[in-house]
Image (cartoon, helix red, strand yellow):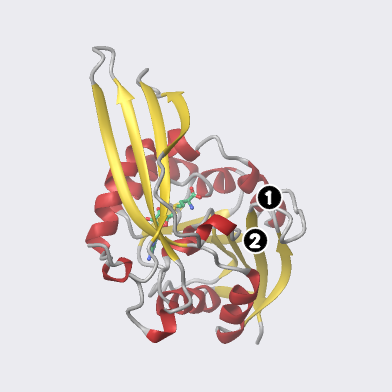
Amino acid sequence: MDDPLNWSGDDQERALRAIAPWYDLDFGPLSDDVAMLLELTGPGQRVLELGAGSGRIAVPLALNDRSVTAVDSSDAMLGVGQDRMREAGVDVAPGDMRCLRLDAQFDWVVFGLSTFQHLLSRKDQLASLRVAERHLADGGRLVIDWTAPRPDDIEPSPAIIHQEWVRQSEAGEVVTKSACQELALDRYYGDALDRALPIAWITYQYDATEDTGRVRRSLARFPLRVNLNAGEMAGLLAVCGLRPLDWYGSWDYAPAGDGERLIVVAESAS
Ligand SMILES: C[S@@+](CC[C@H](N)C(=O)[O-])C[C@H]1O[C@@H](n2cnc3c(N)ncnc32)[C@H](O)[C@@H]1O
């Protein structure tokens, strides 16, 4: 199972089942991307979030009067946030962003926090962008936020696992997160169209120390598309009838290329 292009929905769900219980402890403290989305969108607007996960973005948008539909294909991820999302008035729609067909249109379609990087092949990237375009209302906007290319994305390297943080869970356990990224070079060349698409294996390891001293380990390894640059995204958008309006390099609007994120705001070209 070392070929990321053979990665199946079941493989993905297995990895997400290991991550989901720790997702909010891990990513919950992130708020700058939510603040940016609150600035971009307006009260009363309809927002479709693709890959909404536990509702980290969807819930605060809904609590601030956006009408939010949250789509995700993972039962594990939706399970973590389902009650919170329903309480906040989010419309939760289990589904796959590569083939979604809702009978509704939106002022905003959002791929938040690196969700787009879960799309490993050209075919899946294009299918999801077409889904996004199809769900845009007249004058609607698309936002995609992903990790900017880094030199070590494409350097074959020994996979060194590093500690990212130590935090206390709500249950009072001390939890340590460690992670590593390994380039899956040469392994993903299943299709000529995908030759230029670097994919990395990401490992997340969460160790929870119970008060007895026993350590419970959750381990997940999953592929992510890395080193996706703005030029490539501009090409994908054009093929799907979308036109970029703004590019940013961070959640506080640094110019693209000056930060750790790449964020594009686009509209339908028709
Ligand atoms: C990095 S998480 C982001 C979650 C949330 N947007 C946030 O910012 O906290 C990516 C999410 O995308 C979902 N996802 C991946 N592939 C998907 C697909 N094909 N269709 C729908 N959701 C998908 C995963 O289940 C996961 O919840």
218 sits left or right of 67 in the view: left
Q: Residue at x 29, y 57 (%)?
A: 12
Mark number displayed over residue 251? 1
Tell me the quadrant of the picture where the N terminus can be found: bottom left
88 sits left or right of 211 in the view: right
Name the kind of residue labelled 2 in the image.
Ile
First in sequence: mark 1 vs mark 2: 1
Name the kind of residue labelled 1 in the image.
Trp
16 sits left or right of 27 in the view: left
Secondary element at image label 1: loop
The Cα–Cα distance between marks 1 and 2, rounded to whole angstroms, is 8 Å
Residue 265: % across, % down: 67, 67
Residue 245: % across, % down: 73, 72
Tell me the quadrant of the picture where the C terminus can be found: bottom right
Secondary element at image label 2: strand
Of 124 and 103, the residue lying toward us: 124
Give the quarter of the image for residue 140: bottom right
Q: Residue at x 77, y 59 (%)?
A: 255
Q: Quadrant of ligand 1?
A: bottom left
Q: Residue at x 51, y 59 (%)?
A: 153
- Kindly identify which residue carries mark 2: 263
Q: Are marks 1 and 2 in contact (CB under 8 Å)?
A: yes
Of 194 and 43, the residue lying toward us: 194
